[in-house]
Amino acid sequence: MKAMRAVALAADHAGFMQKARLIEHIRQQGLFEVVDFGTDTEDSTDYPDFAKKLAVWVVQEPERQGILICGTGNGMAMVANKHRGIRAAVCRSEYEARLARQHNDANVLCLGQRLTGDGLAVAIVDVFLHNVFEGGRHRLRLSKIRNMEDCP
Ligand code: RB5
């Protein structure tokens, strides 16, 4: 039997409520092993600490995916994209999430709880988790990104 795909979620204090909602939704589907890297309270935290934990975990296995939530999604994406092998995309629409998977093979989705309501966030997550990379012409472009990961 094929192992369940694994998805991790992490948030700062500005995203933890949406994280809880998304974890509940993903677990209900019964299709993914869900890993929760915190945070779970409104106590002020620093998003780089949570993005780093998740990024380090995602790059350990090729099929792993991650979802990061902060106030806007931007800080989380900036940190995640510092890690070799991470392709993190801030998405505020289902369209962006679909193309982030199909064209960019994004392995981390970044959401902004202050900008995207829970209902849309759930829809974006579903699109992200259930679309696949198209390959083809996009493969060369991703290899160009990979080559830049060693730039000074
Ligand atoms: C926290 O106030 C906020 O700055 C953070 O959640 C995030 O939006 C940063 O990009």
Image (cartoon, grey):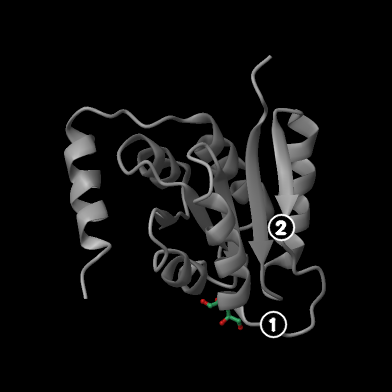
Q: Secondary structure at mark 1?
A: loop
Could you tell me which residue is drawn at 73 percent across and 66 percent down?
16
- The quadrant in which residue 51 appears is bottom right
Q: Which residue does the numbered mark 1 point to in the structure image?
A: 45
Quadrant, the N terminus:
top right
Q: Quadrant of residue 3?
A: top right
Q: Amino acid at mark 1?
A: Thr
- Give above or below for 110 relative to 127: below
Residue at the extreme top: 1
> Amino acid under label 2?
Lys
Q: Which mark is residue 82?
A: none
Which residue is located at x 48 percent, y 39 percent? 62
Residue 36 lies, in percent from the top left, at 74, 55
In the rendered image, the vertical position of residue 32 relative to residue 89, given as above or below: above
Horizontal and vertical percent position of residue 9: 66, 55
Picture layout, residue 98 above or below residue 60: above
- Whether residues under marks 2 and 1 lie with C-beta atoms below 8 angstroms apart, the answer is no
Residue under label 2, please give it: 19
The residue at 23%/54% (across/down) is 145
Question: What crowding class fits label 2: few (fewer than 14 Cα within 10 Å), some (14-19), or many (20 or more)?
Answer: many
With respect to residue 82, does 85 lie above or below? above
Secondary element at image label 2: helix
Separation of residues labelled 2 and 1 (CA atoms): 15 Å
Ligand 1 lies under 8 Å from the Cβ of mark 2: no
Quadrant of the rendered image holding ligand 1: bottom right
Picture residue at 31% right of the left edge, 28% below the top: 134
Mark whose residue sits in front, 2 or 1:
1
Image quadrant where one finds the C terminus: bottom left
Position in image of residue 88 (x %, y %) = 43, 56
